[in-house]
Amino acid sequence: MMLLAPGLEALAVQNHGQLVGQGLLDRIGADRASLLIDGIIFTLIAMLSSLGVDIMPAVTIRNLSEETHRALKVRAAQHNRSAEAEMRAILENAVRPAHRLRLGTALAGMSRKIGLTNADVEALEQARDRKPAKPLRLE
């Protein structure tokens, strides 16, 4: 479940009765009520995103050993940041390594390798057909 604001997920989980009405909760059960809340939150996120409101996802890590948590705090202190900031840095480095292929850099390198100049790009722009493309017909 994504968060709209800190604590909303906890509110949804802890207060199903107040959020969806105790009668509804009794009729549909906790699992369905949880799905209903997830759907409402997803809809709100979609609506806010369409309005240009930035929504930051949140991650909960369960069953983290005390030793790992302690080591994380030590590592965070060594880097002069909070444990949460340290976890973000670890995740960023793991899923977005510095040596990953960057498309713009790769294309610029290929252009330099074949000797493409700004004049060449301008000539291509002038020769380009500017008429809108015809829609694909699937008949």
Image: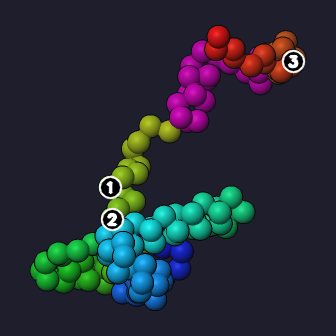
Q: Which residue is under mark 3?
A: 131
Residue 102, percent from left and from top: 50, 39
Q: CA distance from mark 3 to mark 2?
A: 47 Å
The foreground one among 93 and 132 is: 132
Quarter where residue 101 is shown: top left
Residue 13, percent from left and from top: 37, 81
Quadrant location, the N terminus:
bottom left
Q: Amino acid at mark 1?
A: Ala
Secondary element at image label 3:
loop
Magenta stretch: residue 104 in it? yes
Q: Amino acid at mark 2?
A: Ile
Q: Residue at x 82, y 15 (%)?
A: 128
Q: Nearer the viewer, mark 3 or mark 2?
A: 3
Q: Earlier in the sequence, mark 3 or mark 2?
A: 2
Residue 118, percent from left and from top: 77, 24
Quarter where residue 116 is shown: top right
Q: Indicate which disc residue 110 carries.
A: none
Q: Nearer the viewer, mark 1 or mark 3?
A: 3
In the rendered structure, are the residues bearing label 2 and label 1 in contact, judged by CB atoms less than 8 Å apart?
Answer: yes
Quadrant location, the C terminus:
top right
- Is 4 left or right of 51, judged from the image as shown? left
